[in-house]
Amino acid sequence: AITYAVQDANSQRKTEFTELEVSQHCTAADLWGIIDGYVVDLTGFVTHHPGGVDKIMQIVSTRDFSFSRGPNAHFGATAAAFADAAKAFESAGRPEGFELTFQNSLNNGGLDNAGRVTGHASAAMGAIKFIGKVKLETISYLVM
């Protein structure tokens, strides 16, 4: 089951962040990460992750973490739930307090880098809060 919650759809706030800004939120008590180009607050999720706190803390140091591709790809249900939440977040205008809560189960669990199932909880996993998108940074070069 997937649930979404929105606190304030009319809030005016920053919705694009640099990688440096995201990296400043790097403790279990204040943890942000970038997943598939979205900046997410993982603080409410970190202790519920079936792979453990150490696994989720790696997200903050992974430049291109993805639920749907690469070595950290998850079961299809997890990738699909995140993709659906991202679409809903965009459709709602990137509102403050937009949360994704999903169930972890045998069909929607986590995989380690070797492809082994790492968790089988059957309860809500905690909330991932969408903050915004990662800002593409441009570098200017002076040509002489």
Image (cartoon, helix red, strand yellow):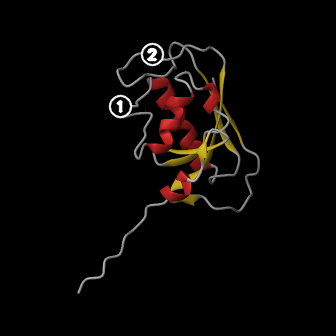
> For numbered disc 1, what is the local secondary structure?
loop
* Residue linked to disc 2: 117
Q: Are marks 2 and 1 in contact (CB under 8 Å)?
A: no
Which corner quadrant holds the C terminus?
bottom left
Q: Mark 1 or mark 2, which is nearer the start of the sequence?
A: 1
Query: Residue 126: x, y in percent?
Result: 67, 29
Furthest residue in direction left, as rendered: 144
How far, Cα to Cα, is label 2 from label 1? 13 Å
> Where does the image place residue 34, in percent across and percent down from the top left?
50, 46
Q: Which mark is residue 113?
A: none
Which residue is located at x 46 percent, y 48 percent? 37
**Classed neighbour count for the residue bearing mark 1: other residues with Cα under 10 Å, few (<14), some (14–19), many (≥20):** some
Is 21 left, or right, of 70 in this rendering? right
Q: Which residue is mark 1?
A: 71
Is the residue 117 above or below the residue 81 in the image? above
Residue type, label 2: Val
* Amino acid type shown at disc 1: Pro
x then y, percent, for residue 86: 54, 43
Image label count? 2
Query: What residue sits 35% from the left and 75% below the top?
Result: 140
Image quarter where the N terminus lies is top right
- Residue 94 to residue 2: above or below: below
Q: Is residue 43 visible?
A: yes
Q: Position of residue 45 (x, y in %)?
A: 63, 32
The residue lying at 60 percent from left, 49 percent from top is: 25
Badge 2 density bin: few <14, some 14–19, many ≥20, Cα 10 Å? some
Secondary structure type for disc 2: loop
Q: Residue 63 vs residue 86: left or right?
A: left
Please give the name of the residue rendered at 60% of the width and 15% of the height, measured from the top-left corner: 121
Quarter location, residue 136:
bottom left
Whether residue 35 is visible, yes or no, is no
